[in-house]
Amino acid sequence: MSKKATPISIEALLSTREIVIACGPGGVGKTTTAAAAAAMAAAEIGGKVLVVTVDPAKRLADALGLKGIGNDVAKVPKRVFTAAGITPRGSLSAAMLDTKQSWDALIAAHAPDAATRWKILGNPLYQNITGRFVQSHDYIAMERLYDLHATGEWDLIVVDTPPTRNALDFLDAPERMADFFSSRLLRWLITPSRSSLVGLATKPFTQVADRILGTQFLADITEFFMSLESMYEGFVERANAVQRLLADERTSFIVVSSSETVPLREAEFFVDELKKRELDVGAVVLNKVLPATLSDRTVNATAQAVLAHTSEIAEALSEQLDAEPEAIERVLVRVVESFDDFAVVARREDQSRKKFAQRSAGVVTVPYFDHDVHDMGTLLELGTVLLGTAS
Amino acid sequence: MLAEQGKSVLACEVDAKGDLASAFELSSVGFAPTSSSNGVKVMSMDTEASLREYLKLHLKVPIVGRIGPLAKAFDFVATAAPGVKEILTVGKLCYEVRAKNYDVVVVDASATGHIVGQLAAPQAIQSLVKVGMIRGQTDWMLDILSDPAQTGLVIVTTPEEMPVAETLQLARDVSAETTVDLASIVVNRVLPERFGPGEESLFEAMKAERILKEIDGIVDGNVLEVLRAADLATTLRRNGAEHLVHLRQGLPAGTPIVLLPYLFQRTDGLRTTTQMATHLAEELT
C-alpha cells in the first residue's frame, strides 16, 4: 500500500506512476483534465502515454486530431503537437470505452469453448446486463484498464472514470464481481436445476422467485449463470488482479472538482472513500477557480470607489468616449454589480477551498479559462497550469 | 413551488446522497417520507425497503419471514437479476402515483448515464419475463410512464458544453429507448445579461489605457482589475449563450426550455430552494 506522507506534484505523479485515474463529480471538467494531463505527459515528460476516456466528446477528439475516439486505441498524429508549436518527447494515444464491445471481448477471452461463448452472447439476460444496466460499466472500465496495462505497451495510462453518481462503484466493482461469482447463493440457484432429483419448485426461495419472476425468466437466469460459472475461476482471478492493480503503488488517483459547494462536498467524499480503501490520492484538482483579485480587499475598495464616483467619472470621460454621461454611469454601475456578484462567489469559494485544503494535501487550482479547450494548444495550456501549481 | 400552491408533493431522491435533505434543511431523509418546513414530503429511495414493501403488499404470504436474512437474498437477487433495483425504484414511484397518495411526485433522478436504464427497466423486464407477477406489474407501470399526462421527464442542465451534449444525448436516448414523454428542459445557472445595446462597446472603449488612467486617478486604485470581473462575466455569459443555441438546435422543435438565473449568493439550503422555486414559477407563467 502506498501512503504518501507528503503530497507530490502532478508532474511527479505523471512521471512515476503507470496508471493515473481521474475521478470526481460530473461536470467539473474531468475528461478535459485527464486529457490535458496525458497530453502534457506526452509532450514534456515523454514515453508512450494513453488516455482512456468514457466521454465521446467530439471536441476532445478534435483537439487530439482524431476523427473520433473509438474502442480501439488510436494514436494522436505528431503534427497535432507540432501545430501547437511543441515537439513532443513521447507519444500520445487515446481510446474510448465501449461497454458492450469490451464485455463481448471479455467473454470471448474467458469462455472455455465456442459453444459456451455463443450461449452467453445470445442470452437475453447478457444483452441486457451489458447494454442497459448500470454496474456493468463500472466493472468493465476497470477490466479494460487492467487489460491495457497488462499489454505493457504504455508507460503511462491516464483514465477518465465514468460519470457515476454512486461515486465509487467502479472501485468496488471488481471485488463485487468476485464475491458474486464465489457466492454460495449462486451455487444454490444453479444446483437444483442440475439435479433431476431436486426439482426447481421444491425450494422455498425458488418458489417465491417463481411466483414473482415467472419460470421462463428463472430459466434464463439459471442458464446464464450456469454458462458463466464455467468462466468462474478466470473471472475471480481477474477481478482480484484488477483490485490489486488499483491498490498498487504504480496507481494513483486524482480527484477533480470545482470549488462550488456541491461538487466540493462530493470531492471530499471521494477523498475520504479513497483513503478508506487505502488507495493513493495523488492530487486534488480544483477547476474553474475565479481570479484572486475578486476577493482582494484593495480591489474591492476600488470597486466601491468607482460606484461612489460614477457621475464624476462619467463627466470626465464623456467627451473622450463620445458618449452621454448617463450611459457611462449605467455601464459603470453594471461593471461594479458584476464585480460584486463574482466577488461574493469568489470569497465563498476561497473559504471552501481553504477548508478543503486542511483535510487534503496536494490541492492544485486551475483558473477559469475564458475559452473552451478546443485544440492541442489550449489543452497543453491547461496542462501547464496543472503541472505548475501544486501547493 | 407546487407545495405553495396547496398541493401535496412527494419529493424523492434516487441516489442516496442527501442533497435533498440539505435543500429542504432536514437532518436526514429516509425511505419513509419526512415533512419539510414548507410542507413538501421528502423521501430517499431505498431499493431494499422498496422490495420489502412490495412483498408485503403483493405476496401476502408469511414466507417473507422465512426467507431468512432478506438483505442477503436481496443482494443476490439484485445482482443476479439485472434491473431488479431499477424496477423497484420505478415501481415504488409508480405505486405512489397510482395510489394517489400525493398530487405530484417529483423525482430527483440519478445521473444521465443511469436514468435511461431506470426508465427503460419495465420494458427490459417485459422483454425478459414473459409471464408471472412481475409481468403484470410492469404493465401498469408502463401505462403510467407512457402517459404524458401522468409522467413527464424534465432534464435539468447548465449552459456548458458537456451538460448540453449530455442533455441532447439523453433526449435522444429517452425517445429511442423509453416511452416517457420529454416534458421540458430546465437550464440552470444562466448568467444575466449585464449590458444593454451599445453599452458593451462603451465598456470595451473604457479599457483603453488613457481612460483607465483617468479613472484610476479619480478612484485612487487600479480599476482594470474591477473591469476584468465584468470581462469574465461577459465571456462566461457569451460562452453560455453559444451552448444554449446549440441546445435549442439539437432538441426536437417545440420542446419547452426554461431558463433559471445563476444565484450568486448561496448555493445551498432552503432559502435557495425557495428562490429557485420563485424563479421557476415566474418562468412558467
Image: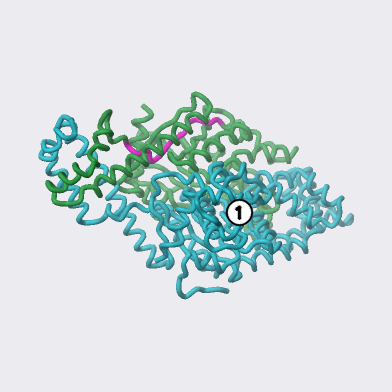
Looking at the picture, does residue A186 appear above or below residue A335?
A: below
Left or right side of A111 for A166: left
Near mark 1 (Cα within 10 A), the count class, few <14, some 14-19 or many ≥20, is many
Kindly identify the residue that appears in the image at 51 percent across and 54 percent down: A86
Task: Name the residue beneath numbered marker 1.
Answer: A52
Seen as rendered, the residue at the extreme right is A196
Instruction: Pick the quarter of the image with the N terminus of chain B.
Output: top left
Q: Verify whether residue A6 appears in magenta.
A: no
Residue A238 seen anywhere in this rendered image of the structure: yes
Residue at the image point whose x is 39% and y is 66% from the top: A391
Chain with colour cyan in the figure: A
Chain under label 1? A
Q: Secondary structure at mark 1?
A: strand
Where residue B199 sits: x, y (%)?
25, 32
Magenta segment range? B181-192
Q: Is residue B189 magenta?
A: yes
